[in-house]
Image: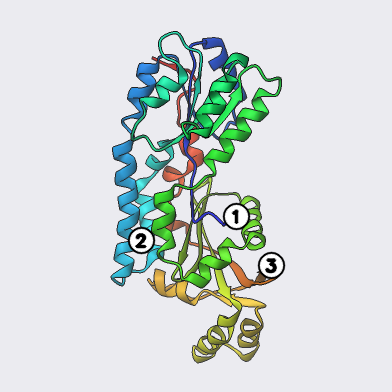
């Protein structure tokens, strides 16, 4: 278990030949999901197959950020600029496609077989007689999940399966951002105890998107309103060095000692990254620890002028979508 380095919302597509079933799904799926409904396999395939080139372009934009960082350009302002420039386009990428197996024109597996090059996750809805086929498809890696269509707890089972897939990271994004981390930093994020504590922090703060970087070490995150936060992470062995920097910059002895002891952190590297006259701040620190490792963290809010804001947040994206209806 490791903490996800790159996470953001994605869209969910449902394909079924039964309009009543699609309307039921539209009503019971979580309100903060972007849901699209299709009855036509051809239309569904056509829409999804328009996405791979956009996915590729978005992945390359992120890789370019890392490439420029390797050339000396700070990561944090680049990521904030990427979010502001993108607005809400990235939220429209479909991460999960849910397909009914038994359809008259094409079976669900035939539909999924037509999605070569589409990199999202696949869920198959099955009846009793198709469950063995679904097991075989799962074992062959053709689908990530299958859910019995007539299960009494279909809403819970389906939303649970979809949410787990929505939370899965994209391998290309993980690889790009992992390259900014040291081996020691990545090892901390792979510690199950530390990873679970960070997951809980993400939930408690209401972050819907985040990127982990190693220089400086921390998590840059957005909430549903498009406001950015910075969770600074400091390895315990780095606290003396941070305290020395604080002392050299004229911070009072009490603050220097608080930093040395891990009671407070200073966002000195965030100040350098953002520049523009921003003054360093201090925040109360807390310890994230496991049996073997320890890291200190402090949360800093980033000025709203540097965040995507009202026009580029996920809440606005969801509010601006058409009512859930079957697409022609």
Can the viewer see residue 102? yes
Q: Is residue 211 left or right of residue 148?
A: left
Q: Quadrant of residue 234?
A: bottom right
- First reached walking from the N terminus: tag 3 or tag 2: 2
Residue at 56%, 63% (x, y): give it: 189
User: In the image, is residue 233 above or below residue 102?
Assistant: below
Residue at 63%, 34% (x, y): give it: 160
Where residue 96 sits: x, y (%)?
48, 33
User: In the image, is residue 60 above or below residue 316?
Assistant: below
Residue tagged 2: 78
Q: Secondary structure at mark 2?
A: helix
Of 114 and 297, the residue lying toward us: 114
Q: Secondary structure at mark 3?
A: loop
Residue at 45%, 8% (x, y): give it: 104
User: In the image, is residue 223 above or below residue 95?
Assistant: below
Q: Is residue 70 left or right of residue 203?
A: left
Disc 3: CA contacts within 10 A as few (<14), some (14-19) or many (>=20): some
Colour scheme of the picture: rainbow
Whether pointer 1 and pointer 2 mark residues with C-beta atoms closer than 8 Å, the reply is: no
Residue tagged 3: 290
Can the viewer see residue 25? no
Q: Quadrant of residue 327?
A: top left
- First reached walking from the N terminus: tag 1 or tag 3: 1
- First reached walking from the N terminus: tag 1 or tag 2: 1
Residue tagged 1: 1
Say which of marks 1 and 2 sits in front: 1
């Amino acid at each position: 278990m490791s903490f996800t380095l790159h996470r953001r919302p994605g869209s969910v597509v449902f394909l079924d030949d039964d309009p009543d079933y699609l309307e039921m799904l539209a009503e019971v799926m979580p309100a903060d999901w972007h849901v699209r409904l299709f009855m036509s396999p051809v239309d569904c395939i056509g829409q999804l197959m328009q996405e791979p080139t956009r996915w590729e372009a978005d992945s390359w934009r992120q890789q370019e950020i890392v490439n420029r960082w390797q050339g000396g350009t700070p990561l944090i302002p680049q990521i904030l600029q990427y979010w502001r420039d993108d607005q809400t386009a990235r939220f429209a990428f479909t991460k999960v496609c849910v397909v009914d197996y038994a359809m008259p024109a094409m079976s669900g597996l035939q539909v999924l077989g037509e999605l070569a090059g589409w990199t999202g996750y696949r869920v198959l809805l099955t009846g009793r007689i198709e469950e063995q086929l679904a097991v075989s498809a799962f074992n062959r890696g053709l689908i990530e999940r299958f859910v019995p269509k007539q299960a009494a707890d279909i809403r819970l089972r389906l939303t649970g399966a979809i949410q787990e897939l929505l939370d899965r990271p994209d391998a290309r994004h993980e690889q790009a951002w992992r390259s900014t981390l040291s081996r020691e930093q990545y090892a901390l994020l792979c510690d199950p105890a530390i990873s679970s504590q960070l997951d809980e922090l993400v939930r408690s703060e209401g972050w819907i998107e985040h990127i982990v970087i190693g220089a400086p070490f921390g998590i840059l995150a957005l909430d549903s309103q498009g406001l950015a936060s910075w969770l600074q992470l400091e390895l315990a062995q780095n606290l003396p060095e941070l305290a020395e920097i604080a002392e050299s910059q004229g911070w009072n002895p009490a603050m220097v000692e608080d930093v040395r002891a891990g009671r407070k952190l200073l966002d000195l590297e965030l100040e350098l990254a953002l520049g523009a006259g921003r003054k360093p701040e201090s925040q109360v620190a807390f310890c994230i620890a496991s049996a073997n490792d320890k890291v200190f963290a402090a949360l800093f809010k980033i000025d709203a002028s540097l965040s995507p804001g009202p026009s580029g947040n996920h809440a606005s994206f969801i509010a601006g979508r058409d009512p859930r209806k079957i697409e022609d």
